[in-house]
Each structure stands twice: as structure tokens, then as C-alpha cells.
Image (spheres, helix red, strand yellow):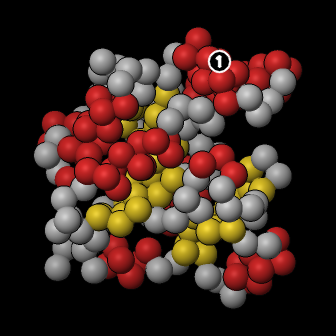
Amino acid sequence: MQPGQLFYLMGASGVGKDSLLDYLRAHLPVDARVLLARRYITRPAGVDGENHIAITPEAFRERQARGAFAMHWRSHGFEYGIDRRIDDDLSAGWQVVVNGSRHYLESARRRYPTLQPILVSVSHDQLFERLVKRGREGPEDIERRLQRAETLDAQLADQSLYRLRNDGPLEVAGNQLLEMIMGVGSEARTSPRAAAASG
């Protein structure tokens, strides 16, 4: 059996990664050999709308010490981890999608040289509107997030990755992501710098 492909979804908070993952869950064929890896995160369940596995910092460090994570990083005061069982899934030929971090991309690439990075983005104005609408941060915090998003995305300008715009209706970007993962979008696979239409 051919080994599976690892898809590494990343982007600033507010670009719609969780919504895209929910779209995949709802639209994947029942017989699709695709797994959406859940993240271990040291924050309570139900926060930020992500379907993650809540874990205490102590339990996270214990799992990390015994090598239970294939990938792990720290961001915004929380620890994030991806279970190492994805290695078995990939070896068994499954397509695996992880919700990753832009900061951790190079480390992820060293461990998984053939991974496919996917950078999800929206316009500055769209991101601002989404962050304001969710009401979790004040103006100064939002401005810092916007500046950070622009800085990190600029640092990835020369990277070989797939760029997925999510400014328009969710189904536009969702279908493009679905086609890519299912192998329908062969042109997108061979042209990693192709820009996705925003709809």
C-alpha cells in the first residue's frame, strides 16, 4: 500500500480553519480514507469552537516526555500536540489532515518532508471584521493579531505551499480543499503556489 499524504493546514486565527475542517467532516465520502487529526490542547473544551482534546499542562508534559506526540508546539500561552498515531495512519495509506502552526512549519517539514502545507488566508479587512465579530479581544489585541498575521504570512512568501483564500462563501474554499485532499484537483497538487479563487 502506498503511504498516505499529510496535509498541514495553517493560518491566522479568524481565517476559518475550524470552519473548513467542519466542512470536510460534513462532505467527505463515507468510504474516504481521510482522517482529520484532533489536537491535544491545554485549554478547556468548547473554547474557540475547535473540536479538540482538552488536557492539563501536567498531562501534556507527561505525554510529551514519553514521545506520545508526533508534533507539538506552544502558541498564545497554550500547548498543542498531534498524536504520534498519525504515523501509523500514514503508513497504512490514509490521508491525514492536521491543524498546524505557521511557527512550527519548518519543524514539521523536517519530520515529514513530503507534507503538503496549506496556508489559509483572508483579506486584512475581512480578518478584522471576523475578529471584532467574535468579541473575544479588545482593539489593541486585535491590532496585534493583525500585525502578527501579516508578519508570519510574509515570512512564508517564498515557501512552497498551497495558498487557499477563504474570503468568499465557505463552500468555495471548502470544495477546493476537499478536491485537493481527495486527489481530484491534480493541477493544484502539482502547482503548490496556485492561488485559490476567493469566490
Q: Residue at x 28, y 80 (%)?
A: 92
- Residue with the mark numbered 1: 128
The vertical placement of 72 against 23, above or below, is: below
Q: Nearer the viewer, residue 176 or 27?
A: 27
The extreme bottom residue here reads 66
Mark yes or no: residue 32 visible: yes
The quadrant of the picture occupied by the C terminus is top left
Q: Residue at x 30, y 33 (%)?
A: 171
Q: Nearer the viewer, residue 155 or 57?
A: 57
From the viewer's perspective, is 14 left or right of 163? Answer: right
Instruction: Name the residue type under label 1.
Output: Phe
The percent position of residue 99, horizontal first and vertical second, equals 51, 53
The vertical placement of 159 against 40, above or below, is: above
- Could you classify mark 1 by the number of other residues whose Cα lies within 10 Å: few (under 14), some (14-19), or many (20 or more)? some
From the viewer's perspective, is 86 left or right of 176? Answer: right
Mark yes or no: residue 193 visible: no
The percent position of residue 18, horizontal first and vertical second, equals 50, 46
The percent position of residue 15, horizontal first and vertical second, equals 53, 31
The percent position of residue 147, horizontal first and vertical second, equals 72, 22
From the viewer's perspective, is 178 left or right of 136? Answer: left
Q: Secondary structure at mark 1?
A: helix
Q: Which quadrant of the figure has residue 133?
A: top right
The quadrant of the picture occupied by the N terminus is bottom left
Q: Residue at x 74, y 61 (%)?
A: 44
The vertical placement of 188 against 115, above or below, is: above
Q: Residue at x 21, y 44 (%)?
A: 179
